[in-house]
Image: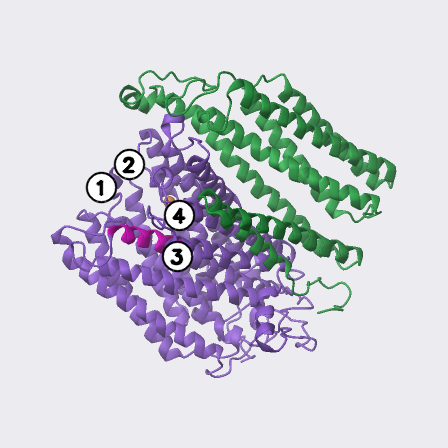
Chain colours: A purple, B green
Amino acid sequence: MTPTRVSKHHDDDHDHGAHQEPGFLGFVKRWVFTTNHKDIGTLYLTIAMVNFLLAGAMALLIRSELFLPGHRLIAPDFFNTMTTMHGLIMVFGVVMPVFVGLANWQIPMMLGAPDMALPRLNNWSFWLLPFAFTILLSTFFISGSAPNYGWTFYAPLSTKYGPPSTDFMIFAIHIMGMSSILGSINIIATILNMRAPGMKLMQMPMFVWTWLITAFLLLAIMPVLAGTVTMMLTDRHFGTSFFDAAGGGDPILFQHLFWFFGHPEVYVLILPAFGVISEILPTFSRKKLFGYHFMVYATAAIAFLSYIVWVHHMFTAGVPIQAALIFMYSTMLIAVPTGIKIFNWVATIFKGSITFETPMLFAIAFLFMFTLGGFSGLMLAIVPADYQYQDTYFVVAHFHYVLVPGAIFSAIAAVYYWIPKWTGHMYNETLGKLHFWLSTISLNITFFPMHFLGLAGMPRRIPDYALQFTDFNQIATVGAFIFGFSHLIFLYNIIQTVRGKGKKATKRVWEGAHGFEWTLPSPPPYHSFLTPPVFVEEASSHEAWDVSDHHEK
Amino acid sequence: MTSHTKGSYYLPPPSKWPLVGSAGIFCLLFGLANWLHGNHFGTVLFGIGAMLIIYMIFGWFGTVIRENEAGLLNNEQVEKSYRWGMIWFIFSEVMFFSTFFGTLFYIRVYSVPWLGGEGIGDLTHVLLWPNFVAKWPLLATPNPNEFTAPHSVMNTWGVPALNTLILLTSGVTITIAHWGLLKKKRTQLAIAQLATILLGISFLIMQGVEYGEAYMEKGLRLDAGAYGNTFFMLTGFHGLHVTLGTIMLIVIFGRILKGHFTPAHHFAFEAVAWYWHFVDVVWLFLFIFVYWI
Ligand SMILES: [Cu+2]
């Protein structure tokens, strides 16, 4: 059998590795000045992990306060800052960076490129982030209060009535937006320009496709967020009235602008996750991805539709009923391409010879629970029903079901899937499975009861609740603590793998894995492909994986 | 990380400029936030940030220009990466301006008429500000005690029309410069480039005159209700971009005098020309929607 993709790469004969001078200063200089996609990918993944633990700890504080009704543990204002910062950090500090980190590691390798197209810009995109988070976290030390109006920072809570720290949050968002825009430009340039000779767009791995589309989403929405927070700033300090009706503006305009950013943003969080799942399911089912072309079109359709649904966040805010109805239908339309994706994933594993390694377990959990989150999303899209659900725990349950087993699980799956390639060592499978079962079960213990709480009328973002909600809240809190601590197993497993404790990984790592990254040694050379490999089309592009082709193992 | 084989993609060595840039932006914005809250070290930090950013711009662009003159970037694929980078950067700028245009349309089409009692706004109108009459330009705000509206607004066919003419002409002169570059007519290139710069500067001067008139005579200020807000936000950010574009044109002019750029290889010139055209097109929309209709 001939390998499906031929690599002309002469095995790292002139791979010079990282240039690291001796000593602590050398270490710092290597990581701070690096222009290497793998180093930068590692930095992104690290900052995401640190922020994940930080924002997770905030969630546990929230759950502790909600363990019993009444005002018990933390002051109400501090509770509000916790919900705000938990959301902001999870979105901007965890899910976005973790996928950019994966993109950095994987896209050049998957395309057969030596590095990202614009390596210095790549470094800049990353190093803006620690500065942005320094500013964001500095708000805890500013008199008044840290941001306390929810991660959506609606006007006038954040303008007229916002604490002084709001301005710091605004500038942190400006810097994060810059980082995302520069990162997206780089990813687009890489994908359009750095593909191995012979690789056409419709032959790219799905993960690359989803990132290409995500990068376009980011380019279109991050400037809108930047403009919006700029108007907040002028409303706060320079006497403008964009979000104040007394001067002719409208606080609801803020919601329109925020959600014009915010809805595509949730697809920024989930499309790369779709890409990861589309890589993992075929590998462990030992089948090609079902309906590759439809997967690409569906992703593009979701991205397009995501621009014209934002008002579904504002049904109760006072928009004309015609607008609410139009946006209800456009929102429901998203279920069509999403349904295509779910169908194709199921068809991919159908009749496959499946094995259940940790990445596959997380991917299958994604399939079930993301779909569940999608269904509650459909319920929320129905205008009259939404009048009932708006601002209750049902909404909290919905978006945690799409983001935790959706975005977070697929990121975890991706780390388990690719870490043998990155480090050259296998992770500990037993611990991986333990992490999976603990986190999956506890996730459902945490978030499933929130559906009932919401339907029964428990409002979100309030530190206290009526007595009858106590039982479900206690269950959720217990689940949250198990969920939180289960990730320490994950962290331990990663650290041990990076330290080289596991057994050596082969080139291909997984029996059913296909693509350029698996033709490189594990760990791969510092510059992935200095001489571009030649992309050889398989029997009929993506239609024919040769399942028996694993002689490299 | 030197001597890659010929034809391979240029991978720059580790660089300090991104970190300098990040630190500069941090100092600038963290300083500004402190400044807004009356902390005096904020002003200092702001100044340090601005200097760091200027240092970064000189250092980073200087590095790229040196690499370019050394022939390291003389590679079709590398140049294409820069092209894609610039194109999508301009796209993100377009979206930034769209935010403010969107705001303008929303305020004109929805929020102001609603405040005047139309559509879903009848109760708001009756209960909050029954005396407010919806009209654009907004010469009376819903609550005049809080926000003072301007007495009058700019005359479309005065300075704004002249500025339109100036910018359109500059779009022509930069194209003439480009032709000169392509046909190796260096004098034509230099003169047309200089003309573009002078047109850019005269636009800025006219805009300054207009702002003076708006503030001193018409009471048209940034805080003069929704009309002033959108007027200054849109023209202000546009003016900022013209300023940046003019600085970029001046840098290119300097490089022209130094003999840089060949007919086959002049990406920096093109990038600045694209940027200039972008600024030009934004102005046309401004002229139509802010000044004219
Ligand atoms: Cu949405």
The answer to whether the residues at label 4 and label 2 have Cβ atoms under 8 Å apart is no
Q: Which residue is mark 3?
A: A90
Magenta-colored stretch includes residue A11: no
The answer to whether the residues at label 2 and label 3 have Cβ atoms under 8 Å apart is no
The mark lying in front, picked from 2 and 3, is 3
What chain letter is assigned to the residue under label 3? A
Secondary structure found at label 1? helix
Q: Is residue B157 left or right of residue A90?
A: right
Magenta stretch in the rendered image: A76-90
**Disc number placed over residue A165 in the picture, else none:** 4
The mark lying in front, picked from 3 and 4, is 4
Q: Residue B23 lies in what quarter of the image?
A: bottom right
**Disc number placed over residue A316 in the picture, else none:** 2
**Nearer-the-camera pick, A155 or B105:** A155
Q: Are marks 1 and 2 on the same chain?
A: yes
**Nearer-the-camera pick, A8 or B2:** B2
Q: Which residue is mark 1?
A: A388
Locate residue B36, reporting x and y percent.
46, 42
Q: Quadrant of ligand 1?
A: top left
Secondary structure found at label 3? helix
Measure the alpha-carbon separation of dots 4 and 1: 33 Å
Tally the numbered discs.
Answer: 4
The residue under the point 48% across, 45% down is: B35
The residue under the point 79% across, 44% down is: B254
